[in-house]
Structures are given as structure tokens and as C-alpha cells.
Amino acid sequence: MPVAVAHIRAEARHLRALGWSYRRIARRLQARHRLGALVAFRLAHGWTQEEAARRWNERWPGRGPAKTGKTWSYWESWPGKGGRAPSATVLSRLAELYLCRPGDLLDGPDFGELDAGADGAGDRSAAGCSCEAGAVGDDDDRCAGLLSVAATLASPTGRDAPSATAIEARLAEFVTGWVPAA
């Protein structure tokens, strides 16, 4: 059963509040709701097609014809029937607007996932998290939330560190209902 767009936007806001990047939110939305990359990144920001077009026009005024929600519809429908392929320049600008890489906006398999190496501090295995990379579901939410708490505590400034009570409450949220895999 299809999920309402408002529900997807609410999910994106929740994940952003947990400290997720727009790229990670978009990947989650793609996998969970079978969305194309362009749609997923727009919804990760919580924007309608018209709002995305407005932001484009504000950022790049006078550079070609003004973009509209219909323009977004054409791009997001591509490569399907009636869609129009965005040019390399458009993909670059969309990436700037969505805070990602142009390649993130193209659908298809990510062969980089075949690479056994870690991508750095954001990689779960590098951060010491045992959650399966790319997992979708409650465990993934808990792991992300736990990592955001850990990152705050590890902050060199320490000024944004939550209180012990807040940490205990957050940890209680993570473990409630969690059952480790057998």
C-alpha cells in the first residue's frame, strides 16, 4: 500500500532530528518507499516540487528560463515515459541544492558497496556499531540515534553534551523493545 507523501516528509524530519545527513535520509527513503533518487532527495528536504523550483530560482535567478514544479516532474519522471533527462549542469546544481554529489541523484546500483574498505568516521563499522550497513528498520534508527549521542559526547568542546538524565532517557528509548538477532 502506498504511503502518503506527508508521512514520508514526517519520516524525513524525524531522521534529520536524529542527526542523519540528507544523503542518508534519501537513501533510506529510496529503499523503504521505492522512490527514485531525485524524488528521495527532494522529500529528504521536505520540499514539494514547487518549493524546490522556487529555491532553484532564488539561488540562480536569470540563468535560463525559470524552473517550475512541472520542470521537476519531468526530471523526476526520467528515465520513464514522459520524463526528461537533466543535463550535467542541472545535475550539478541539483546536487548543490540537495547538498549531495551529482552521482547520488542517479538511480541504479552502487557498486562502491562491493568495496570491503571503510569510508571513514561515518561508516558504521569504523564507528564500532554492529548494525548491518544499509539496514532499514528500527535497529537502524536506534543505531543512528546512539551514534549521534556518542558523537556529541566525543565532541572536543563538550559544551553541547547532554545531561546524564537525558542520556539515560535516550538509552532507555533505544533498548525498549530491542531484541538482539540470534
Image: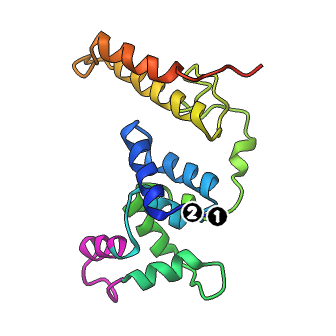
Name the outermost residue toward the top: 164
Name the outermost residue toward the left: 159
Q: Is residue 57 magenta?
A: yes
Seen in the picture, residue 22 relative to 133 is either above or below; the reply is: below
Q: Is residue 97 magenta?
A: no
The residue stretch that appears in magenta: 51-67
Q: Going 63% across and 27% down the picture, which residue do you hit?
A: 131
| Kind of residue indicated by mark 2 | Ala
Given residues 139 and 67, the one toward you in this image is 139
Q: Does residue 154 appear in this view?
A: no
Q: Which residue is mark 2?
A: 37
**Position in image of residue 118 (x %, y %):** 63, 31
Given residues 90 and 149, the one toward you in this image is 149
Q: Going 40% across and 37% down the picture, which residue do you hit?
A: 19
Disc assigned to residue 107: 1
| Kind of residue indicated by mark 1 | Asp
**Position in image of residue 164 (x %, y %):** 31, 10
Sequence-wise, the earlier of marks 2 and 1 is 2
Q: Quadrant of residue 83?
A: bottom right
Given residues 82 and 95, the one toward you in this image is 82
Q: Does residue 12 appear in this view?
A: yes
